[in-house]
Every structure is written in C-alpha cells, then in structure tokens.
C-alpha cells in the first residue's frame, strides 16, 4: 500500500510522451523494424511478465530489461498485459498443469500476441517460431523448448476451436481478474462493459497547454504547422491523433505544454473556480508528485495571482520530480517532503500553522481508472487492497479537513472507478462532518466517456481516464 502523502500512480515504465505502440502489424520479419531479433524481445517480455505475475511492478520489471531492447519489449508487454486473461485461458486448454514460471510466461506471451491474427504485431507463425527460439536460448526454458513448441504448434492448428472454448470465461473475455469484473458489475451496472473495454484500449496522448505562455488555439496552430493533428478537449487540453515523444512537441522544454490526461486536468479548475484569484490564497496539494496538478494550479491562477501553493510528497526521491516539473514550466511552489496524514510534523513548522483556503487531496488509490495507461495494475491489485486504501483515504480526509479555513474548500479525488474510493468514501465523510457540504462535482468519471450525466457542465467532452471528484465546502465559522 502506498504511504500517505506519496503519489499513487503505478510506477510503470511508460514515460510521459513515450510511444505505447507496436511494431509494424502483420510483419513476418523476425528482426522487426528495430533490427533487434524478435526472439530477444519475446524473451524480454516473458521475463518482465514473470516478474509482474510474481507481484513486481511494471516499472521494476522493465528496469531489468536491457536498454536496447526496452522500447520493443515495452510495446509488446503492454499488448500481452491487455490480453493476458485470454492467454492464460488458452494455456489451460493446451495443458492440464501450469508449466514452470519461466516457461509459462513465454508460452502466455506467445499466445497473448497471436491469439487474434488480425491484431497480432507479427505473423502468428513468426511469433511461434521466435518464441521457440527464445525458449532454446535461455537456460530457464531450454528444457521446456520442445513442450512450448508442441503447445504453440497445436494452437496454430486448432486456434479457432481453442479460442471458442475460452469465450465463456469472463477473465478471458474481459482480460481482468474475476473479482474486478464483479466489482464493476456491482458499482456500475450500466457501464461496467464500457469501463472494461476502455481499459483494454490504448490510451490517447493528451496535452495541457500552459495558459501563462499561450492559448490552446495558438499551440494547436504550432502543432498543425508540424503536421501534428490534434483536437481540443476541456479548457486547456489537446488530444493528439497519434502519440509522439515529448522532445518532438514544440516548446515542451520551454514549458509551453505538459502531458496530462483530460480527467486529471479538471482538478485545478474545480478547486479554484469561484475563488478570488486576485487575493492572496493559500493552497495545499497534499499528494503532489510528480507535480502535474501543482503546476496546473499555478498556471490556472495566472502570473498576476498572489496564490501560494504548498506541495507535499512523502517520498524524497519522488519529490525531485515536482521540482523538475516546476522548473521546466518556470513556476514556483513550496515543496515539502512530508506525510500529509501527519500534519503535526510539518504544518506549524513549515506553514506557520496557517489554515488553507483550498486543499487538493489526490489520494492514494487502486488506480483502477487508469488501467489503459498502466495495464499491469489489474494483475497486481488484490480485492483486499480496496478496503486498505479506502481506510488510508479516510485518514487523509480526517487529517486535512481541520486545515481548511472556514469558508474554504477541499477537492477530494482519486483515479479510481471503485465506489468505495469515491461516492462511498465521501458520503461517509459527510455523515461524520456536519460542517462539510458537497458542492456540484463530477463524481465518478467513466474512462473514455465524455457524457457523464449529473456532472458539472464543464467536464471534458472527449477521451479521458477514470476518475472521481468531490468538492467539499467548509461552513463559515
């Protein structure tokens, strides 16, 4: 469970602006576009998959991959994780006992990439040949090479029948753990299928234009001049038709734009709208790393605003990300390495014991709303994590609410679609805090759905991650 005050996003290896894409579709070239042998990439994917299945994060698993192999391995691994449920079901059709971990990971890698011929990144026979080659080249799988070869050859011969035999398996159908599917069916009976479908798709790349340095229209023209297609989303966002490295974005190094999903871009406007930004305001970003929302608060307030933002992060290493983000954008905030759940350790010493006009609590959560960006999350989480994280969220709310000035506000948000971390959490809080009132808020944002009924009218109208927002107002003294 993530410590309180730390940023809760899964630490996967896909950096902002990097390409979550696949090698050329339908390729039969075992070296692919990169010139790296496909068997080497498949071996790297299988090793990373084995680590994830053992409970390691995607970030840690990818960090162990050779740098020269990493781009191709990452792209293939993301596809494998998005279809792992089907691959494991197919493997159970092929063998009665689970193979040793290394062989199982390689077998499932090949099955995940080749089970749908129209979506396979390489010709299925090429994937099978190269998977067998990878098995022969590794000490961990050499003894099972013939077994893997026999399984995959049978799969090629009987693919349609084997796939049909797994269609009734909900884990194979939706590529999520069964408890996750059932939880969504209960929490979102009308939208659970949409959520799961969105989770299995590749997320779009969305930019946030720095309002201090230009307008959305101006930046869109800069993109168009470079033949980069985009569409406006929300107040300050642009969604790119195709992702590209941040180094290729005009003015990125100069702070003209940042990478941030449209759902996350709603935090700053929700918290600050209606406040007098011409007056000195004290604002706390309670779980701030890597600093995207901290920066957006300052951008939204504008250069002439006397706003004072304090950003907390419990992890000293990750707090450096906040500094890097602010430096690139030319912004300044007070950055503290501190636990948001323990205000007695930092509030009086570093904030002079002054109450805040507004607090942003982007709380640690299951990250169930950002699975399309972090496909390892679904396989790492356990159902018991929900209650543990909900308890942590409640502690953070209880610790930070006393720091809100009477008449002030707190924006509670999570990148989760589970109601225990959203609606249920807030209703419990309201029941125990009679000085709190819920202001118009988006509530649960469903991934990929811009038409959120009952939400505030300025919601983004395009693709976005799953999120929850509740804006809480504190009664005047």
Image (tube, grey):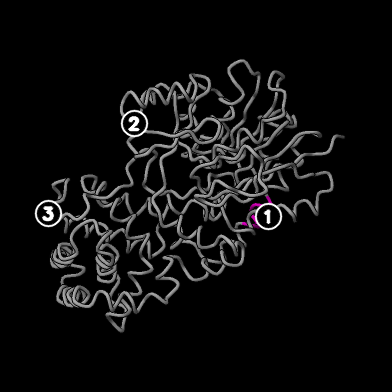
Q: Quadrant location of residue 103?
A: bottom left
Q: Which residues are magenta?
A: 390-395
Residue placed under numbered mark 3 in the picture: 29
Residue placed under numbered mark 1 in the picture: 423
Rendered residue at 54%/62% (across/down): 192
Q: Nearer the viewer, residue 403 or 358?
A: 358
Q: Quadrant location of residue 146?
A: bottom left
Rendered residue at 51%/67% (across/down): 181
Q: Is residue 88 above or below residue 33?
A: below
Q: Is residue 394 magenta?
A: yes
Rendered residue at 56%/50% (across/down): 3
In the displayed structure, does residue 444 sit left or right of residue 79?
Answer: right
Residue sitting at the far right: 477
- Residue 156 seen in render: yes
Q: Position of residue 109 (x, y in %)?
A: 27, 64
Q: Are marks 3 and 1 in contact (CB under 8 Å)?
A: no
Q: Is residue 414 above or below residue 137?
A: above
**Tag 3, which secondary structure?**
loop
Q: Is residue 182 above or below residue 388?
A: below
- Residue 143 seen in render: no
Residue placed under numbered mark 2 in the picture: 228
Q: Residues within 10 Å of mark 2 (few under 14, many from 20)?
A: some
In the displayed structure, does residue 105 sit left or right of residue 252?
Answer: left
């Amino acid at each position: 469970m993530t410590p309180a005050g730390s940023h809760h996003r899964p630490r996967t290896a896909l950096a902002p602006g990097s390409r979550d894409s696949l090698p050329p579709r339908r390729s039969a070239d075992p070296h692919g576009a990169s010139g790296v042998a496909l068997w080497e990439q498949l071996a790297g994917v299988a090793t990373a998959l084995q680590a994830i299945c053992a409970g390691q994060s995607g970030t840690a698993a990818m960090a162990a991959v050779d740098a020269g192999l990493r781009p191709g391995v990452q792209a293939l691994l993301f596809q494998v994780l998005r279809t792992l449920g089907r691959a494991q079901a197919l493997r159970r059709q092929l063998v009665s006992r689970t193979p040793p971990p290394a062989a199982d990971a390689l077998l499932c890698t090949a099955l995940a990439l080749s089970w749908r011929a129209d979506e396979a990144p390489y010709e299925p026979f090429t994937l099978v040949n190269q998977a067998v080659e990878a098995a022969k080249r590794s000490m961990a799988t050499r003894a099972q090479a013939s077994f893997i070869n026999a399984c995959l050859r049978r799969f090629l011969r009987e693919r349609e029948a084997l796939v049909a035999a797994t269609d009734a398996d909900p884990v194979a159908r939706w590529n999520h753990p069964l408890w996750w599917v059932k939880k969504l069916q209960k929490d979102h009976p009308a939208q659970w299928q949409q959520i799961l479908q969105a989770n299995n798709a590749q997320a779009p790349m969305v930019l946030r234009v720095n309002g201090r340095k230009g307008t959305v229209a101006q930046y869109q023209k800069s993109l168009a001049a470079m033949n980069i297609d985009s569409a406006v989303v929300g107040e300050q966002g642009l969604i790119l038709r195709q992702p590209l490295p941040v180094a290729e974005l005009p003015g990125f190094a100069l702070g003209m734009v940042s990478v941030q999903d449209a759902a996350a871009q709603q935090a700053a406007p929700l918290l600050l709208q209606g406040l007098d930004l011409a007056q000195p305001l004290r604002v706390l970003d309670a779980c701030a790393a890597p600093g995207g929302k901290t920066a957006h608060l300052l951008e939204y307030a504008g250069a002439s605003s006397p706003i004072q933002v304090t950003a907390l992060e419990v992890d000293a290493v990750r707090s450096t990300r906040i500094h890097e983000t602010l430096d690139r954008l030319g912004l300044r905030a007070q950055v503290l390495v501190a636990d948001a759940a323990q205000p007695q350790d930092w509030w009086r010493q570093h904030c002079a014991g002054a109450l805040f006009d507004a607090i942003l609590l982007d709380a640690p959560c299951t990250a169930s709303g950002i699975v399309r960006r972090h496909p390892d999350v679904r396989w790492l989480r356990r159902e018991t994590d929900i209650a543990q994280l909900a308890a942590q969220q409640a502690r953070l709310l209880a610790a930070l609410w006393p720091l809100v000035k009477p008449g002030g506000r707190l924006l509670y948000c999570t990148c989760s679609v589970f109601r225990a971390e959203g609606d249920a959490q807030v209703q419990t809080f309201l029941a125990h805090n009679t000085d709190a009132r819920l202001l118009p808020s988006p509530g649960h944002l469903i991934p990929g759905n811009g038409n959120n009924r009952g939400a505030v009218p300025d919601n983004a109208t395009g693709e976005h991650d799953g999120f929850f927002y509740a804006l809480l107002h504190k009664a005047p003294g």
